[in-house]
Amino acid sequence: MTTGFIGAGKMAEAMMSAWLKAGMVAARGLVAADTDEARRRAIGERLGVRTTASNAEAATAELVVLAVKPQQLDGVIQELPAGALAGRLVLSIMAGKRTESLQKAMPGARIVRVMPNLPCVVGEGMSAFCAAAGASDEDVARVRALLGAFGKVIELPEDRFDVVTALSGSGPAFFAYVLDRLAGSAVAQGLSRDEALLLAGQTMLGTARLLLEQGTDPKALIASVASAKGTTAAGLAVLDASDVGAVLKRTLAAAAQRSRELNS
């Protein structure tokens, strides 16, 4: 299967790298298009794939991945010959762009909308997808396998994608924000920055694996760690007395609202 990427940013590179390592695509059958010459050179050197400045060239592949910013879609479509994507399997990883809009822009394409996230770089991505009318069961199975090469996969109705974008798409930045603040507080208490980041990062990683692999509810984990009048209870008392829950709710709502706006 030949594969073309329209846009070769960090997420596109992570996906290409994972698929190449897993043997799901061959370097000789993969082409990455990007307007940035330096970016093309870097991708070619690191991955050994063909690169081009022509989106139309990438659009000739059997599988086409749209990995540009949502605001760039109209410009990309204008560059392509009429009907260039008709009959092709198209994966869109653009935030906010609904399948209805994509079908209007690319009539006849077999479209699957995907929201991956940056941890796919280390094989721990979280990808949600939904298939538009016209995508076959075989297309869905192929997409599920491709996404599974770099993490966990879930198929969801499209009306949930704005909150998916906010939670797992933007989520790595939110989790990193919290980790950074915790590490900074530990530095203020005497740890070095490197020590604090190692302790905080491994603790976040271990907590996530514990919750997922054992199917533990976060509330149950909190209860198991927090003994009466202990250190955890002292810290939790501060959290419970603050408005951190409300702040996180507003954070997620703002990101989801921006996702809705990107489709307009």
Image: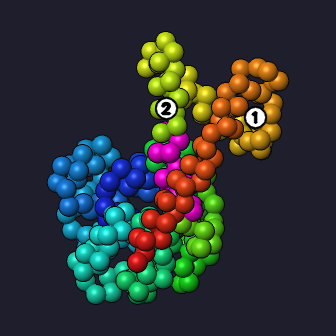
- Observer-nearest of 43 and 202: 202
Query: Residue 40, percent across and down?
Result: 22, 53
| Left or right of residue 172: residue 107 | left
* Residue located farthest toward the front when viewing the structure as drawn: 241
Residue at 81% of width from left, 24% of height from top?
Answer: 227
Q: CA distance from mark 1 to mark 2?
A: 20 Å
- Residue 126 seen in this snapshot: no
Residue at 60% of width from left, 43% of height from top?
Answer: 244
Badge 1 crowding class, 10 Å Cα cut-off, few under 14, some 14 to 19, many 20 or more, is few
Query: Where residue 222 is drawn, which disc sits there?
Result: 1
Query: Residue 147, percent across and down?
Result: 54, 57
- Which image quarter: residue 28? bottom left
Q: Is residue 115 above or below residue 262?
A: above
- Observer-nearest of 186 and 3: 186
What span is in magenta? 163-176
Quadrant, the N terminus: bottom left
| Left or right of residue 257: residue 209 | right
Q: Is residue 244 above or below residue 190?
A: below
* Residue located farthest toward the top when viewing the structure as drawn: 190
Residue at 54% of width from left, 79% of height from top?
Answer: 132
Q: How is the image coloured?
A: rainbow
As helix, strand or loop, the secondary structure at mark 2 comes to: helix
**Mark 2 = which residue?**
181
As helix, strand or loop, the secondary structure at mark 1 comes to: helix
Q: Is residue 85 above or below residue 47?
A: below
Under mark 2, the amino acid is: Arg
* Most common secondary structure along the magenta stretch: helix
Residue 81 forms part of the magenta stretch? no
Query: Residue 80, percent across and down?
Result: 26, 79
- Observer-nearest of 211 and 90: 211
Residue at 24% of width from left, 46% of height from top?
Answer: 42
- Which image quarter: residue 2? bottom left
